[in-house]
Amino acid sequence: MNNPWYKEFWPWFLIAVPIITFTMGGVLLKLAVSTEDSLVVDDYYKEGKAINARLDKEAIAKKMNITTDLTINDGSIALQFHSGIPKEGNAVKLSFYHVTLEDRDVSVLLSRDANGIYRGFVEESLDGKWRVSLTPFDDSWKIQNTLHLPYSGTIKFNP
Protein backbone atom coordinates (compact mmCIF):
# COMPACT_ATOMS: atom_id res chain seq x y z
CA MET A 1 0.00 0.00 0.00
CA ASN A 2 1.62 3.13 -1.22
CA ASN A 3 0.36 6.39 0.21
CA PRO A 4 0.29 9.43 -2.05
CA TRP A 5 3.24 11.83 -1.49
CA TYR A 6 1.09 14.57 0.05
CA LYS A 7 0.10 12.28 2.92
CA GLU A 8 3.72 11.68 3.94
CA PHE A 9 5.64 13.75 6.53
CA TRP A 10 9.03 14.20 4.82
CA PRO A 11 7.93 15.99 1.64
CA TRP A 12 6.09 18.60 3.69
CA PHE A 13 9.07 18.97 6.01
CA LEU A 14 11.42 19.49 3.04
CA ILE A 15 9.02 22.05 1.54
CA ALA A 16 8.57 23.90 4.88
CA VAL A 17 12.31 24.48 5.51
CA PRO A 18 12.95 26.80 2.51
CA ILE A 19 9.58 28.55 2.93
CA ILE A 20 10.33 29.36 6.58
CA THR A 21 13.87 30.42 5.67
CA PHE A 22 12.71 32.84 2.96
CA THR A 23 9.98 34.23 5.24
CA MET A 24 12.39 34.90 8.13
CA GLY A 25 14.95 36.34 5.71
CA GLY A 26 12.31 38.74 4.36
CA VAL A 27 11.33 39.83 7.88
CA LEU A 28 14.96 40.44 8.86
CA LEU A 29 15.64 42.33 5.63
CA LYS A 30 12.60 44.56 6.26
CA LEU A 31 13.80 45.27 9.82
CA ALA A 32 17.33 46.04 8.64
CA VAL A 33 16.10 48.48 6.00
CA SER A 34 13.37 50.21 8.01
CA THR A 35 15.13 50.75 11.38
CA GLU A 36 17.99 53.08 12.23
CA ASP A 37 20.93 52.14 14.41
CA SER A 38 21.45 55.15 16.67
CA LEU A 39 24.75 53.83 18.04
CA VAL A 40 26.58 54.17 14.71
CA VAL A 41 28.35 57.49 14.14
CA ASP A 42 28.35 58.89 10.60
CA ASP A 43 31.17 61.43 10.94
CA TYR A 44 34.07 59.76 12.75
CA TYR A 45 36.45 62.70 12.37
CA LYS A 46 33.99 65.13 13.93
CA GLU A 47 33.24 62.66 16.73
CA GLY A 48 36.98 62.24 17.39
CA LYS A 49 37.43 66.00 17.71
CA ALA A 50 34.50 66.11 20.14
CA ILE A 51 36.11 63.37 22.24
CA ASN A 52 39.34 65.39 22.43
CA ALA A 53 37.40 68.49 23.52
CA ARG A 54 35.59 66.42 26.16
CA LEU A 55 38.91 65.11 27.48
CA ASP A 56 40.21 68.69 27.71
CA LYS A 57 37.19 69.66 29.79
CA GLU A 58 37.78 66.72 32.12
CA ALA A 59 41.43 67.79 32.49
CA ILE A 60 40.27 71.29 33.46
CA ALA A 61 38.00 69.78 36.15
CA LYS A 62 40.97 67.83 37.53
CA LYS A 63 43.13 70.96 37.49
CA MET A 64 40.43 72.88 39.39
CA ASN A 65 40.42 70.03 41.96
CA ILE A 66 36.63 69.71 41.91
CA THR A 67 35.31 67.26 44.49
CA THR A 68 31.61 66.55 44.98
CA ASP A 69 29.21 64.21 46.73
CA LEU A 70 26.14 63.06 44.79
CA THR A 71 23.03 61.63 46.46
CA ILE A 72 20.07 60.21 44.51
CA ASN A 73 16.98 59.06 46.43
CA ASP A 74 13.70 58.29 44.61
CA GLY A 75 14.29 60.92 41.94
CA SER A 76 15.53 63.60 44.36
CA ILE A 77 19.09 64.64 43.50
CA ALA A 78 21.49 66.50 45.81
CA LEU A 79 25.01 67.55 44.82
CA GLN A 80 27.40 69.07 47.33
CA PHE A 81 30.71 70.66 46.28
CA HIS A 82 33.66 70.29 48.65
CA SER A 83 36.16 72.11 46.44
CA GLY A 84 36.10 73.80 43.06
CA ILE A 85 32.68 75.37 43.57
CA PRO A 86 31.51 77.21 40.42
CA LYS A 87 31.91 80.93 41.00
CA GLU A 88 29.48 81.98 38.29
CA GLY A 89 25.88 80.91 38.25
CA ASN A 90 23.64 79.25 40.73
CA ALA A 91 22.96 76.13 38.68
CA VAL A 92 24.75 73.20 37.06
CA LYS A 93 23.56 70.59 34.57
CA LEU A 94 23.58 66.89 35.45
CA SER A 95 22.97 64.59 32.47
CA PHE A 96 22.15 60.88 32.62
CA TYR A 97 22.99 58.87 29.50
CA HIS A 98 21.74 55.29 29.42
CA VAL A 99 24.47 52.98 28.15
CA THR A 100 22.28 51.31 25.51
CA LEU A 101 18.90 53.08 25.25
CA GLU A 102 19.09 56.62 23.89
CA ASP A 103 15.36 57.19 24.58
CA ARG A 104 15.99 57.02 28.35
CA ASP A 105 18.59 59.85 28.40
CA VAL A 106 17.63 62.74 30.68
CA SER A 107 19.18 66.04 31.81
CA VAL A 108 18.44 67.76 35.10
CA LEU A 109 19.11 71.37 36.08
CA LEU A 110 20.41 71.51 39.65
CA SER A 111 19.94 74.86 41.39
CA ARG A 112 21.82 75.95 44.50
CA ASP A 113 19.88 76.35 47.73
CA ALA A 114 20.74 78.55 50.73
CA ASN A 115 23.06 75.89 52.18
CA GLY A 116 25.12 75.72 48.97
CA ILE A 117 23.77 72.30 47.97
CA TYR A 118 22.64 71.88 44.38
CA ARG A 119 19.24 70.17 44.19
CA GLY A 120 16.98 68.85 41.46
CA PHE A 121 14.37 66.22 40.74
CA VAL A 122 13.91 63.68 37.96
CA GLU A 123 10.61 61.87 37.37
CA GLU A 124 12.01 59.04 35.22
CA SER A 125 13.28 55.82 36.76
CA LEU A 126 17.07 55.81 36.98
CA ASP A 127 17.56 52.10 37.56
CA GLY A 128 20.44 50.48 35.70
CA LYS A 129 23.85 51.49 34.38
CA TRP A 130 24.25 55.19 33.48
CA ARG A 131 26.97 57.45 32.11
CA VAL A 132 26.56 60.63 34.19
CA SER A 133 28.13 64.00 33.36
CA LEU A 134 28.17 67.24 35.33
CA THR A 135 28.82 70.58 33.60
CA PRO A 136 28.35 74.27 34.47
CA PHE A 137 26.31 76.54 32.21
CA ASP A 138 29.36 77.84 30.34
CA ASP A 139 30.62 74.28 29.64
CA SER A 140 34.08 75.24 30.86
CA TRP A 141 34.68 71.90 32.62
CA LYS A 142 33.10 68.47 32.84
CA ILE A 143 32.99 65.58 35.28
CA GLN A 144 31.92 62.25 33.83
CA ASN A 145 31.53 58.87 35.54
CA THR A 146 29.65 55.60 35.16
CA LEU A 147 27.14 54.78 37.88
CA HIS A 148 24.97 51.78 38.72
CA LEU A 149 21.66 52.96 40.15
CA PRO A 150 19.81 52.71 42.48
CA TYR A 151 22.54 53.36 45.00
CA SER A 152 21.85 54.08 48.66
CA GLY A 153 24.25 56.53 50.21
CA THR A 154 26.59 59.19 48.93
CA ILE A 155 28.51 58.81 45.68
CA LYS A 156 31.93 60.45 45.34
CA PHE A 157 31.51 62.18 41.98
CA ASN A 158 34.97 63.44 41.11
CA PRO A 159 36.97 63.78 37.86
Image (tube, grey):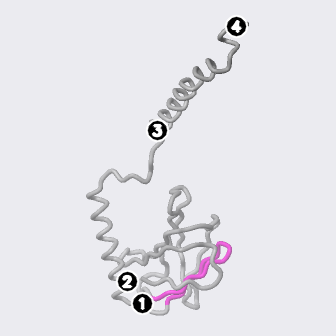
- Labels 4 and 3 touching (C-beta < 8 A): no
Find disc 2 in the rendering and name its residue: 61
- Splitting the image into 4 quarters, where does residue 15 fall? top right
Q: Which secondary structure lies at badge 2?
A: helix
Residue 49 vs residue 93, the one in the foreground: 49
User: Tag 4: residue type?
Assistant: Asn
- Labels 1 and 4 touching (C-beta < 8 A): no
Find disc 4 in the rendering and name its residue: 2
Going 62% across and 67% down the picture, which residue do you hit?
A: 127
Report crowding for label 3: few under 14, some 14 to 19, many 20 or more residues within 10 A (C-alpha).
few
Q: Earlier in the sequence, mark 1 or mark 4?
A: 4
Q: Quadrant of the C terminus?
A: bottom left
Residue at mark 4 to residue at mark 3: CA–CA distance:
47 Å
Find disc 3 in the rendering and name its residue: 32
Where is residue 50 drawn, in percent x and y? Answer: 31, 65
Report crowding for label 4: few under 14, some 14 to 19, many 20 or more residues within 10 A (C-alpha).
few
Going 65% across and 81% down the picture, which residue do you hit?
A: 152
